[in-house]
Image (cartoon, rainbow, N blue to C red):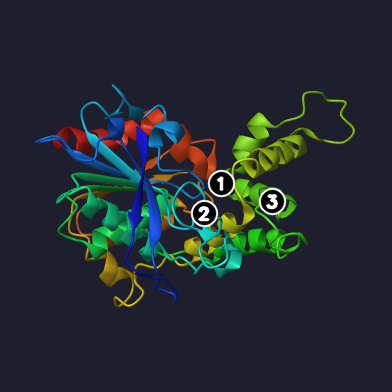
Amino acid sequence: MEKHILEYEKPFEFEAGGVLDKIQIAYHTPDGRERPREGEKVIWICHALTADSDPQDWWPELVGPGKFFDTDRYFIACVNMLGSCYGTSGPSSLNPKTGRPYFFDFPKVTVRDIARTINIVREHLGISKIDFIVGSSIGGFQALELCIMYPDLIRNAAFIATLGRVTPWLTGFEESQRMALEADPTFRECKDLDGGKAGMKCARTIALLSYRCEDGYNRKQAEQSDDTIFADRAASYQRYQGEKFAKRFDAYSYYSLSYSVDSDNVGRGRGGLARAYGMISCPSKVVAIDSDLIFPPYEMEQMAKMIPEAGYSVITSHYGHDGFLLENEQIMKELAPILESL
């Protein structure tokens, strides 16, 4: 898949306040094509928090030529989230008024803002129907919003490891990560995009604990010797993951996206969750992960019951929430009937 940048040169009003005169939106399509072929089915993938708009990169077992989501057979599109640092406007973008990154001057972004940018790209591509939309985690937030905001647009949907309203438990994790960023004295200095790196390494390790589970850590990070004085295998893993993340992301974009997570509430202004879920008119599949700490199956099952044409299933994983990235065979088995019906 190849990357495009759409220059949207109209004022963009943010739901929580603030306006930018123009924004840019990054997205990927197969072979860089700007239009589906005649009769080609359209599959839209919504990415998770710190991924980019190339699902072939972060879902390599599922997306690509000859894969489950076959880029030779389907027109597959994915849009980078507003507020990210992978091509779409965000805190790390240059503010034309100052010539420096926006940092904290970038407006707060909600899931609905992100959904609107996805629709801007969809209109740019001249797509009148999306045959199948798939979203996991915050990608699921986006998919849910799109199904509600544009009910005549989407024919089938899958919501994986996600919910239509952020829980206090998840907000607690997000706030702990923001506190880690704020504890780094370089974060508020806003000298350059390396600010807050130490805080972000810590924040990422907090997030990782929420994405995984006890079972997975105990299996993968157990000490290799019975004679170890101080257990350090898991500690080393945490530090490695923090360092790895800090090399590819910036703290200001991460801070912004954390608030996008906290904005998740499809019932806002629509009469509550049940009424909002009832607005989803396309056949849907809700897929939970048995070890997911942040979107546990019992909560996802309640959501599925409120969506009119939703099926519900649970996959098993030793890897918690991250199972949506790792349990490829199970994910394909759950989504195959939808794909075969297109």
Res. 164 visible in picture:
no
- The residue that mark 3 highlights is 194
Residue 224 in the image: state x and y as whole percent: 77, 24
Secondary element at tag 1 = helix
Of residue 53 and residue 58, the one placed in the foreground of this image is 53
Question: As drawn, is 76 to the left or to the right of 197?
Answer: left
The alpha-carbon separation of the residues under discs 3 and 1 comes to 25 Å
- The residue that mark 2 highlights is 294
The dot on residue 211 is: 1
Q: Residue at x 40, y 43 (%)?
A: 53
How many residues crowd around disc 3 within 10 Å: few (fewer than 14), some, or many (20 or more)?
Answer: some
Question: As drawn, is 309 to the left or to the right of 203?
Answer: left
Q: Given the image, on which type of amino acid does mark 2 rest?
A: Ile
61 vs 80: above or below: above
Res. 171 visible in picture:
yes
1 vs 242: above or below: above
The alpha-carbon separation of the residues under discs 3 and 2 comes to 29 Å
Q: Residue at x 43, y 57 (%)?
A: 82
**Residue, far left:** 39
